[in-house]
Amino acid sequence: MAFDSKIPKGEMNEKWNDYKGHVKLVNPANKRKLEVIVVGTGLAGASAAASLGEMGYKVKAFCFQDSPRRAHSIAAQGGINAAKNYQNDGDSVFRLFYDTVKGGDYRAREANVHRLAEVSTSIIDQCVAQGVPFAREYGGLLSNRSFGGTQVQRTFYAAGQTGQQLLLGAYSALERQVALGNVTMYARHEMLDVVMIEDKARGIIARNLVTGELEKHFGHAVLLCSGGYGNVFYLSTNAMGSNVTAAWKAHKKGAFFGNPCFTQIHPTCIPVSGDYQSKLTLMSESLRNDGRIWVPKNKGENRKPVDIPEEERDYYLERRYPAFGNLVPRDVASRAAKERCDEGYGVGTTKLAVYLDFADAILRYGKIEAGKMGDHSASEAALIQLGKEVVKEKYGNLFAMYEKITGENPYDMPMRIYPAVHYVMGGLWVDYELQTTVKGLYALGEANFSEHGANRLGASALMQGLADGYFVIPYTLGNYLADEIRTASISTDHPAFVETEKAVKDRIDTLLNIKGKQTVESFHKRLGLIMWDKCGMARSEKGLKEAIEQIQALKKEFWSDVRIPGEANGMNTELDKAGRVADFIELGELMCKDALVRNESCGGHFREEYQTEDGEAKRDDENFSFVSAWEYVGESDWKLNKEELTFEIVKPTQRSYK
Amino acid sequence: MNLTLKVWRQKNNQSEGSLETYQVKDISSEMSFLEMFDVLNEQLILSGGEPIAFDHDCREGICGMCSMHINGRAHGPWTNNTTCQLHMRAFKDGDTIVVEPWRSKAFPVIKDLTVDRSAFDRVIQAGGFISVNTGNAVDANSLPIDKKDADDAFMAASCIGCGACVATCVNSSAMLFVSAKVSQLALLPQGAPERESRVLNMVAQMDKENFGNCTNTYACEAECPKGISVANIARMNKEYLQASLTTES
């Protein structure tokens, strides 16, 4: 099977320009005859569908939600990076490229990352032109803030709702194309398989989630923009419906899966409160700009946080990483929190939490405000009041969300936070053109294994999703479709469509006929526990081997004892969930296998056997400087292919934030 | 706590629905309202019944998918809140809670508590955008925007499209939803070229979708999870009047 990353030759900063200058084009008359299927309508999918529609392709877009506006990109809070250097603080395309390769712990492809940094500036221009209301300064120009893992201010934001505003921008562009007739939208539809004709992807089988009917859709190319698979852990910051099914079906039809074990555990989430918990809520990383993270110096501390004196607090990030302090990258911050809690310094009822404290920031802002008013004798209470107003303007919606969930007021009491699964760097393997190992099948956004290597920096997911959809796929897709202009639309009566549809129907019938005793949810929870304990923040050979056995056993039990009420005709949310959990179980096994062969620690992948004396990740560039690209062979059987990574510009060094 | 739930059950949009009564036990006050529904659904499945269909996705108050009418209020008893962010400490042991879907001619029930809100998408298709193709944009800082206008546009843009405004309105009016988008784009210089056609087309589509008119009860603002102000409705009325007077038809 073809396995070529197709990285253009030439100097790093000329590759993309050179590619664009020589790529094949499709003339407007031919574009009208070419059909493109887009699965998923988050930032990557909506921007791709809108852009391709504008170009004149006939697009069909699918999402499982009731409207494309609800895709989970909407929940991204903090911001989007771009190398605009509006703050005159020394930022550049090169620095964004460098930070991203380093932040990813040297497990990303340099050429892709450089392209991402190059197009980042156009994304901000495009979004502002669409009416995305980014935060502004009093002079009317755009405001920036800093984010973890960088020392410049390159993050654009819209309060704590950046993802929402960017998605609504892309959604409005998409709806405009729907109105113009260039895009047909299929909401409440779920893709259940890819249709292959000869060796090319030629369409999909989708289930109408309202009527239950299976539908066959032809496309000259299929774009999977279906997001990440963090819900394999059951508890994550993903939406309840986020799933791996579209990507997994593609994988079983020949698309390699890249670095499946690379998971991002986000350091600042609201801790688990009980076993009924259905999801976890992120508190934006932007809070680390002003919040200080600490635990008590004494084990078994029982006083309220405000009663613990300064000298009895351990600001462990500031202590361990003085250069970056509370702004170390996510993988580093998460592991440090786990280390403290494992050592017995955790706080709260479960002792699996650390404090994120705004008291210093409130006082500091209060002093600045009082200074502006010329009041140099304000009481501490007055300063705190002034400071709270500033903090409210910056983070008001996040503080309100925290209070709703926990019932505690974070203006007066430090937040309790703990790491949670948030994002996956792994995904379908794609080449420079975002094409998977299946011809005509592309993966964009979080669904691909992407530019983030083994760890994603904050505010880079939104950047990548929109880069792929607005500025990469419109060029690279043409390079494939230019050779497809002679392919007439294929009838969905073609045997390949009929057979694939039948296989999908058979699987649904099999699931419904098990009529066992355990609910889908209970299987999902059990899978999540195995994954979190053994393939979560710390992994070991022993644990991973156990996990693989447990998952295989769970799979057997699922297929013999799951209970799905209702029928295939009509809306059946349990059936939808069952199909997704069945795929998560298979994916979980592959993630453990991937983690098991990677005998090193890098980014979000931490193998207990491979750490330095002071507990930092120990990378092994000599043996593991590659992308794992897993090929599906058969049930519980995969072949590992390796894409060697070479670094021309950013020479791998030990990542230090000290 | 132990609770009695009366929940609207309806097989599909062809059938008649009714309120069914269920008991749930040992509900923790730390649970979210939807987690309490998860418990109920697990109970229903295990006892041979069918779970209640309800829309939900992000469970952090931002996607706008959840949509329950709880004890007569859209999204339940807390203000500026979505159903998914409602927590059980809002209730006490022994309470009876009545849960219904959004009620509006423009939002037909699909099943149980799930309704069809695609009318909102069609209103956006009528003009809720700025016509700028990918690649057309000028540098983002080439057009400074007064901070107050930018902030007001942002406040209007924080609408999550959940439909609580429609569900709570005696007239099933969508004025708050439509005016939030009209306002956002009218406040920004980028929205100026299509300002008049936008408001006329969006209002025309709103009427076509069977949403009612506005009689200034302000219930929409009171129940909006994002606190969108009715000042947007006033702005839309001004935009509409201005456009009607100056546009040739």
Image (cartoon, rainbow, N blue to C red):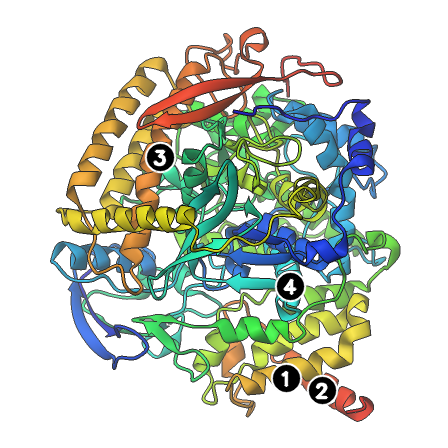
Specify the label residue A208 is tagged with: none
Marks 2 and 4 belong to one chain: no
Q: Residue B93: x and y, percent?
A: 20, 65
Q: Amino acid at mark 2?
A: Tyr
Label 4 lies in what chain?
A
- Report the residue marked by disc 3: A302
Near-viewer residue (B209 or B97):
B209
Q: Amino acid at mark 3?
A: Asn
Q: CA distance from mark 2 to mark 4?
A: 29 Å
Q: Closer to the observer: label 4 or label 3?
A: 4
- Report the residue marked by disc 4: A182
Which quadrant of the rendered structure holds the C terminus of chain A?
top right
Is the residue B129 above or below the residue A8 in the image?
Answer: below
Q: Residue B14: x and y, percent?
A: 30, 79
Q: Secondary structure at mark 3?
A: loop
Is the residue A310 above or below the residue A82 in the image?
Answer: above
Q: Secondary structure at mark 1?
A: helix
Q: CA distance from mark 1 to mark 3?
A: 59 Å
Q: CA distance from mark 1 to mark 4?
A: 23 Å
Q: CA distance from mark 2 to mark 3?
A: 61 Å
- Report the residue marked by disc 2: B240
